[in-house]
Image (spheres, rainbow, N blue to C red):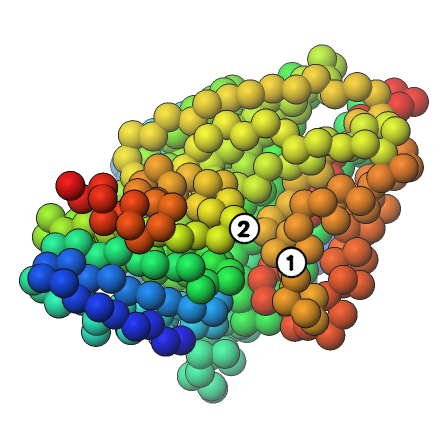
Amino acid sequence: MEISTEREGTLLVARAGGRLDSINAREFDDALKSAISESDQVLIMDLEKVSYVSSAGLRVILLTAKNLQQRSAKLLICSLAEPIREVFEISGFDKIIPIHADLTAARASLG
Amino acid sequence: MSWKYKILVVDDEPDLERLMLQRMRRDIRAGLYKFVFAHNGLEALDRLKEEPDIDLVLSDINMPKMDGLTLIEQIPKVQPDIRSVIISAYGDMKNIRTAMNRGAFDFVTKPIDFDDLKLTISRTLQHLVEWREALESRDKLVALQNELGVASKIQQSILPTRFPDKPGCRMFANMKPARNVGGDFFDVIHLADGRIGIAIADVSDKGVPAALFMMSCRTLIKGAAIGKTDPGEVLHEVNQLLQEDNDAAMFVTVFYGVYDPDSRRFHYANGGHNSPLVVHADGSSAELPLTGGIALGLIPDLDYDNKSVTLAPGDLIVMYTDGVTEAFDEEGNQFGTQRLQEVFAGAEPTDVQAANRSVFEAVEKFAGDTPQSDDITCVTLLHGSDGG
């Protein structure tokens, strides 16, 4: 599981690829934790290259959102492929975490 | 005389002792169960100290000297490796919930339905046996894989194995666990007036913590289901209880429906689960409309909307987990809902078990040699076109 990150001030963009499933959920979690710094106010997860998200993957995303929220930072998600968008919709997670069509839209939502 | 399991029954009503010995006489004679009795919590604790071979405690709630809820809390201090089942008034969710929180494994309601009690006892004991075996092997091999073995045994022990098979409602359900991953479960709950509560669910994680989360989820659904008639309220209550102290952010997607064979009405609510299919007598099918609910265990005070459909004769409801639609083939394609619909296309579903099996066969054929990455669960309900 590899993620690449880019930091612009207090905004962190993290790009993941491949499958986020129970096999690499912990790895994904560790990678995110080490990438995020205390000063980050917004994390945008760009999941364009992700082909599959299982419930274990969703849980990592949710835990990340929760941890950020605890210190008043927030998580946005963007660029979901259609099947993954459906996973977020069916589980109702699109109502918990803001989802944007692409990185530009996610950035724009920050005002 | 020897017996396999010793059960301590705690109740202040003297009639229960006579009734229990009478209704359970076959199992007693066959050497399966030995019953011993106590009339309040204090007496029960004394018996547990005197007789360390007691396997299960079946206890009433309201009793003099020490009530059942206090007893449940005290049991692990005397005998940690024991399971308890509580007897409560019908719909007394407050006490049932307290008992569950204090470690009761299951509950039965008054007036006691002895068939239900027998099933509950045998399921609890089965769980206990598997738990003991698992603990034993865990002592020998402290390894992750082994812990997952414990989880999978817990998972297997809560699944029902008998299903309604009556005119107007025939059901079948099956779960094929993935190696090292456990999260799916289902339940069939017999409600008042012949209605049947059906739950299918998928817990987000694996391992022992997830299995314990699954167990409390299953028990909470059962408890809420008999206390409430509205599926949305059932999910609301279960969510409310699960989200307390859930720092690990585990969650569960749950579809819960209540089927009334008399009116053929299927009333349901959905907490983030895949929408079931309705297959009609001509083989055409459609997904049940979504109700827009969020997976349970995460956010307090959620409302869950209800929807309902009335089944036509011959209609089959296919409930499933994402292990079905998200099964992969060798090229990395997903099975998807369309292939699931194709399983039923063109033929009238007449046998609920065959319909269930055909889902598993189609997924297996599609996946080929690709390893199964998630549990696969399918629950089918048929209202036969012959009225039966």
Query: Mark 2 highlights which residue?
Result: A83
Q: Is residue B94 above or below residue A87?
A: above
x and y percent of residue B314 in the render?
85, 26
| Labels in figure, total | 2
x and y percent of residue A87 in the render?
49, 48
The residue at the far front in this view is: A104
Looking at the rendering, in which quadrant would you find the N terminus of chain B? bottom right
Q: Are marks 2 and 1 in contact (CB under 8 Å)?
A: yes
Helix, strand, or loop for circle 2? helix
Which residue is pictured at 53% across the width and 66% down the height? B181
What kind of residue is marked 2? Pro
Q: Is residue B248 left or right of residue B330?
A: left
Q: Is residue B365 left or right of residue A103?
A: right
Residue B327 visible somewhere in the drawing: yes
Observer-nearest residue: B112 or B238? Answer: B238
**Chain designation of label 1:** B
Picture disc at residue B57: none
Classify residue B288 by image quadrant: top right
Observer-nearest residue: B300 or A63? Answer: A63
Observer-nearest residue: B64 or B231? Answer: B231
Query: Mark 1 highlights which residue?
Result: B334
What kind of residue is marked 1? Gln
Residue A63 visible somewhere in the drawing: no
The residue at the far top in this view is: B263
x and y percent of residue B331 in the render?
68, 69
Classify residue B349 by image quadrant: top right
Looking at the rendering, in which quadrant would you find the C terminus of chain B? top right
Alpha carbon distance from label 2 to label 1: 9 Å
Report crowding for label 2: few under 14, some 14 to 19, many 20 or more residues within 10 A (C-alpha): some
